[in-house]
C-alpha cells in the first residue's frame, strides 16, 4: 500500500530511493509463498497533488516491473485518482509495456477494492471495506542478529552446497525441456531442496529484515525455513 500524498520528489536522494525500491521488491519476494506467485500494489491517490508526482521514480518502477520482475506483478490498483492525475497519466501511459498496462486497474470507491483484495486483508483505513486494524510497528535491529555473516568458513560450506544443488537443478531443467515424457518429479524435488538450502544459506549472506525479527508477542512473519505466518487484526 503506497500513500502517494506522503511523497515529495526531491525530499530524499534519488539513488537512495532506487536502492530502497529494490530492497522492498527483494524483501517482498520473500513474503510470497506457493501457490501464490504475484503481488498486488495499491497506489492510494487520496489527497494527491502535482507536488507528489515523481516522474523519475515512476520510470524506474516501470523498468523494474518490465525488465527485472515481470512475472511478480499481479495487479496495480490506482485508487481514488483525482482529476489532476489524468494529465499525469497521459505522460505515464506511453511508457508502459502492454503486459504491464493490462495489469493496471482504476478504482474509486473503497468497496471496489474488494474485487481484488479480501476485506480481512484490506486495512480498515479504507472505510466501509477493509477490516484489518493493523498498525505499522517498526522493529529495530537487534545487536548480533547478523553475527553468522562473519563466519566465513560456515558461509563457504552452505554456499558451496547451494551452488551444487543449483547445477543439478539446471541439468534437470535441461532434461525436462528436451523430454517428451514426464520427468518433472525429479526437477520438483530439486526445486524444493534448492529453496530449503537457500534459507539455510540466507543468514550467512543476507542481513535480517523487518519481517524476520521477532515482535513483542514473540512472533515473526518470515520463519527461519522461509515459510510465512500472517496475523490479521480483524
Image (tube, rainbow, N blue to C red):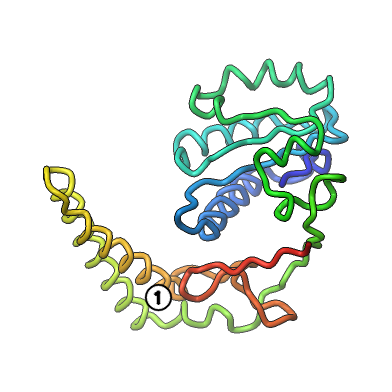
Q: Which residue is depicted at the point 68% across and 38% down?
A: 115
Q: Residue at x 75, y 35 (%)?
A: 112
Q: Residue at x 74, y 50 (%)?
A: 119
Horizontal and vertical percent for residue 183? 16, 54
The quarter of the picture where the C terminus appears is bottom right
Vertical relation: 17 (above or below) 168: above
**What residue is at 49 percent from the left and 27 percent from the top?**
99
Could you tell me which secondary element the residue under label 1 belongs to?
A: helix
105 on left or right of 130: left
Residue named by callout 1:
200
Query: Number of labelled discs?
Result: 1
Pick whichever, 133 or 193, lies toward us. 133
Of residues 181 and 227, the one nearer the viewer is 181
Task: Estimate the x, y position of residue 69 in percent, counting from the top left.
Answer: 47, 42
**Against 113, is 220 above or below?**
below
Image side of residue 19 versus residue 195, left or right: right
In the figure, residue 127 lies in which quadrant? Answer: top right
Amino acid at each position: 500500500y503506497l500513500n502517494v500524498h506522503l511523497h515529495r520528489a526531491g525530499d530524499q536522494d534519488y539513488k537512495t530511493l532506487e536502492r530502497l525500491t529494490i530492497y522492498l521488491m527483494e524483501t517482498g519476494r520473500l513474503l510470497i509463498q506457493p501457490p501464490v506467485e504475484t503481488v498486488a500494489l495499491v497506489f492510494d491517490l487520496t489527497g494527491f497533488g502535482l507536488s507528489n508526482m515523481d516522474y523519475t521514480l515512476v520510470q524506474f518502477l516501470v523498468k523494474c516491473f518490465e525488465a527485472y520482475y515481470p512475472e511478480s506483478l499481479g495487479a496495480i490498483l490506482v485508487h481514488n485518482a483525482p482529476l489532476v492525475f489524468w494529465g499525469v497519466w497521459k505522460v505515464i501511459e506511453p511508457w508502459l509495456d502492454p503486459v504491464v498496462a493490462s495489469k493496471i486497474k482504476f478504482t474509486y470507491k473503497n468497496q471496489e477494492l474488494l474485487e481484488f483484495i479480501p476485506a480481512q486483508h484490506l486495512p480498515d483505513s479504507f472505510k466501509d471495506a477493509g477490516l484489518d486494524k493493523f498498525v505499522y510497528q517498526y522493529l529495530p535491529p537487534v545487536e548480533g542478529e547478523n553475527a553468522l555473516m562473519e563466519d566465513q568458513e560456515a558461509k563457504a560450506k552452505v554456499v558451496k552446497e547451494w551452488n551444487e544443488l543449483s547445477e543439478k537443478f539446471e541439468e534437470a531443467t535441461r532434461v525436462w525441456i528436451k523430454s517428451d515424457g514426464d520427468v518433472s518429479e525429479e526437477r520438483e524435488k530439486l526445486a524444493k531442496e534448492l529453496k530449503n538450502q537457500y534459507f539455510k544459506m540466507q543468514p550467512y549472506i543476507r542481513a535480517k529484515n523487518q519481517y524476520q525479527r521477532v515482535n513483542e508477542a514473540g512472533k515473526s512473519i518470515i520463519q527461519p525455513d522461509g515459510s510465512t505466518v500472517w496475523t490479521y487484526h480483524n
